[in-house]
Amino acid sequence: MTAADQLIGYAKSPDPYRTAPDDLAALQLEAIRERFAERRQQIRTLDKRARETGIDEIRSLDDVVPLLFAHTNYKSYPEAFIDAGQWKHMNVWLRTLCTYATDNIDVSGVRDVDDWLDRAHDAGHFLFASSGTSGKSSFLDQSQKDRDYAIPACLNAFDLSTPNFKPNHDRSVFTMMPSKGTHKMTEVSTVHFSRWAAPGELYRLSDEPIKAMDSMRPAQLRRLLGAGKVGPGEIAAYDDEMVAKQRRRAEAMETWLDNLVRRRHDPLYVGMMWGTAWQVVDKLRARGIKDGDFHPEMIMSVGGGTKGAVLPDDYRTQIMRFFGITEDRLPNSYAMVEMSGFCALIQPHGVYAIPPWIVPLILDKSGEVLLNPANGSGLVEGRMAFFDILADAHWGGMISGDKVQVEFGSGLDGVKTPIVRSVARYQDLAEGEDKLTCAGSIDSYVRGAIGA
């Protein structure tokens, strides 16, 4: 068995953070060495990067740093490919960043990006799309193997964060997430919430699928309008469509809240984002519901969703007080869509354990210097990057926009893997975000490959 296979096997372990091997660091380095030797033969962009940086093999983690891709590289396709319906070109773009051939993706009759994603799935490329808040979604490929291991890894991390409660099909579950969609968490959450819900007690705010084009369409229309390729009539039709969608969502919200009020004294599992949770609190208070008027063992999975939301400074405290939630009933994790599995919340310490198949690479802000402690022990602050050994359909080396504090060798509560003690987004900090040199380099390779 290869080192990579040994570490991937932990993805199906109920607690990979405490059962990780004692020689984890050595095993991780060997696994990365194996992955690099294999992937550079499969991913042309990686091979070009390796040749230009003079890296022929991985001797230490320092060798990995110049080979990291940025999260923005997965949205490096020219927008004209989507605007003009050049789906064969999108296949070519995808091939520059993924492990497997993409010429088996049938693009005949494809109308929009969601059709293209469906065709990719039919061909065994289980792409998911980022939320595309910038107006441009990232597309990251997954194989069936990726899904087979990543989903149980996510579920086990969820369960570890609420050690006093187990999924047993005995709760009323309320979630904002539809059962289908292009976001990676759709599939995970569908499986997760189904394990907790009693028969007939899974309440979705809406079951309209999440589509990539929903977040991309406004920016596309602005581009096409500026180029004179759409007229006011098409813009008006889109605006009408959005008004109708918002009306449906508002109506669905009231029905969802009706059911939540009716079930509030039963054991609940509620999943939503902080911004939406504040809206729910506001609406339920208007209905006369008082703080704490919920079942005492209610579980609430909540996170994200604060960007652009108008929230009081103490929104988190107010939301938890309203629902009567204590920290042990607040499952959480640290992750990003490019990562296989989650860094699990370790109760009651409020830290996140990194799974053994994820190798944290803490860098300086520029993303060029590795800061990991030489002796394998200590607290380090810097930019979060990592190598995902589990990744099968894409290169596992990734650099993020997060500023983190990571402790190596803590041994906290029997955890054998590094732990994340704090997380923030550079773009949200006073110091701001910088452009990453690696991102521009990889993008230039992609453009060159497409042109060729």
Image (spheres, rainbow, N blue to C red):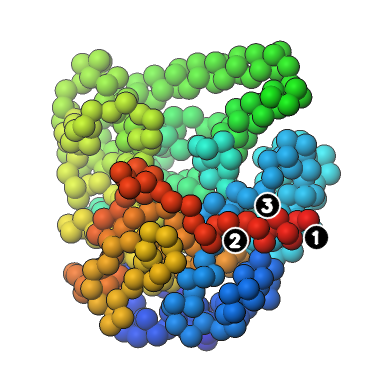
Residue 141 in sight in this render: no
Q: Secondary structure at mark 1?
A: loop
Q: Which residue is mark 1?
A: 452
Mark 3 burial class by Cα count in 10 Å: few <14, some 14-19, many 20+: some
C-alpha separation, residue under disc 2 versus residue under disc 3 = 29 Å
Q: Which residue appears at 73% of the width and 39% of the height?
A: 80
Please give left or right for residue 385 compared with residue 240 in the image: left
Q: Is residue 284 above or below residue 272?
A: above
Where is residue 381 shown, x and y percent of the image?
A: 28, 62
Q: Earlier in the sequence, mark 3 or mark 1?
A: 3
Contact check, label 3 and label 1, Cβ < 8 Å? no
Q: Which residue is mark 2?
A: 441
The quarter of the picture where residue 39 lies is bottom right
Q: Which residue appears at 19% of the width and 33% of the height?
A: 314
Where is residue 240 shown, x and y percent of the image?
A: 61, 14
Q: Which residue appears at 19% of the width and 40% of the height?
A: 325
**Foreground tag (2 vs 1):** 2
Where is residue 172 shown, x and y percent of the image?
A: 34, 37
**Foreground tag (2 vs 3):** 2
Q: Is residue 350 above or below residue 60?
A: above
Kind of residue sitting beneath label 3: His
Query: Where's the C terminus, which quadrant?
Result: bottom right
434 or 127: nearer the viewer: 434
For residue 121, the mark is: 3
360 or 191: nearer the viewer: 360
Residue 226 in sight in this render: yes
137 or 319: nearer the viewer: 137
C-alpha separation, residue under disc 3 versus residue under disc 1 = 26 Å
**Foreground tag (3 vs 1):** 1
134 or 413: nearer the viewer: 134
C-alpha separation, residue under disc 2 versus residue under disc 1 = 17 Å
- Considering every residue shown, the one lying at the far right of the view is 108
